Image (cartoon, rainbow, N blue to C red):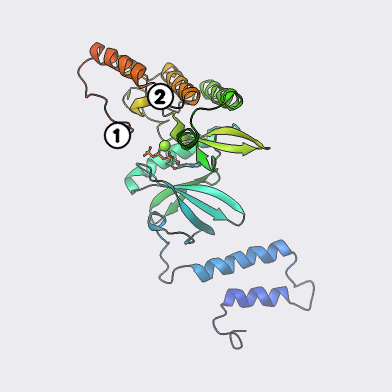
Amino acid sequence: MPAVLDGASSKLEKLVRQATQTDTLLRTDSAAAFLRQLDAVEEELTAPEDGAVPDPLNATIDDRLPGNLVVKGKLGAGGSAPALLVERGNDQFVLKVALKPEYNSRLRDELEVLQKLRHQFIVAPKSDLLNFNGLNAFLVDLAGERTLAGRLGADGRLSGEFLERFGDDLLNVLEYLEHEDVPHRDLKPDNIGVREYSKQLHLKLFDFSLSRLPLDNTRAGTPDYMEPFLALRPRWDPHAERFSAALVLYEMAAGTLSAGAMARARRTSLKMRSPSPPISSTRRFARP
Ligand SMILES: Nc1ncnc2c1ncn2[C@@H]1O[C@H](COP(=O)(O)OP(=O)(O)OP(=O)(O)O)[C@@H](O)[C@H]1O
Ligand SMILES: [Mg+2]
């Protein structure tokens, strides 16, 4: 075959030879087997020539990563792990990749947490731990076309029916996490997707990157959604999660957080606790 078709690889040659065998016993036995072999040929053809794995951190649209993953965009920068939208065939996934090898253990921890959970309103992992050029990564469900934060920002407060349904979804997840003894520690509309299930929109929680932090680290999280009195306690506890959930419920109903109420609660908290830096940013606190 290479003699008549320039550039045909040995894999492609074998694929065609097997699929067209006159002896039916030797012929590729199913369309599925043929497609599997075809995938292998495609991977070989699209692999970089020097054998290096393409860098997912610098991937652009339609770049192909190992595992037949085609990059379709970047969903978020992520302080320790950017999230890429990828496709394999007709399936879409989110690929979280560690920004640096130092963050590899965070990715491993987050994946281990997700592997223990099984809930329709929480994203499910879609791969084992992957590694691209020394950077840990994993695939996870797409939580939705947009986040709850995106929806509230674009459309404002939720109407009665959505408020009731999304409120139920959130409390359902909260109850499940408490039952499983798994903290999320960063509940906020930015970490919640809105997704359609059998023609109805529902919430889907993601970003369990703070779940495994030591409980005595009471400063990790997103300040706007953190319980102001948490810092007065020696360790994180589920009351803090309930407080964040209550703020998300409030935001769903009002369209925005009550800045006045939060500021008052914070001032009281800051007065009561030992000296610590003022909470001024809406960004997440750095991890230790
Ligand atoms: N499973 C998902 N489905 C849909 N969008 C996602 C998913 N995972 C991540 N994203 C998008 O990527 C963004 C960043 O991802 P993620 O929240 O997991 O990272 P991060 O750990 O919050 O980053 P940081 O450490 O800066 O907070 C999210 O805000 C969201 O827009
Ligand atoms: Mg996040």
User: In screen coordinates, is 282 left or right of 67?
Assistant: left
Quarter of the picture for ligand 2?
A: top left
**Residue on which disc 2 sits:** 257
Identified at 70% across, 61% down, the residue is 32
Tag 2 near tag 1, CB within 8 Å = no
Q: Does residue 274 appear in this view?
A: yes
Question: In screen coordinates, is 119 left or right of 30?
Answer: left
CA gap, disc 2 and disc 1 = 22 Å
Position of 168 with respect to 183 (left or right) is right
Relative to 1, say whether 136 is above or below.
above
Q: Is residue 87 above or below residue 266?
A: below
Instruction: Name the N-terminal-most of marks 2 and 1.
Output: 2
At numbered mark 2, what does the secondary structure look like: helix, strand or loop? loop
> Which of 164/215 is in front?
164
Pick the front one: 115 or 285: 285
| Mark drawn on residue 275 | none
- The x and y percentages for residue 60 are 43, 59
Kind of element beneath mark 1: loop
Indicate the amino acid at tag 2: Leu
Kind of residue indicated by mark 1: Ala
The percent coordinates of residue 28 (x first, y second) are 72, 69
> Which residue is labeled 1 in the image?
286
Determine whether 49 is above or below 117 in the image: below
Asked if ligand 1 lies within 8 A of label 1, the reply is no
Q: Position of residue 99 (x, y in %)?
A: 35, 48
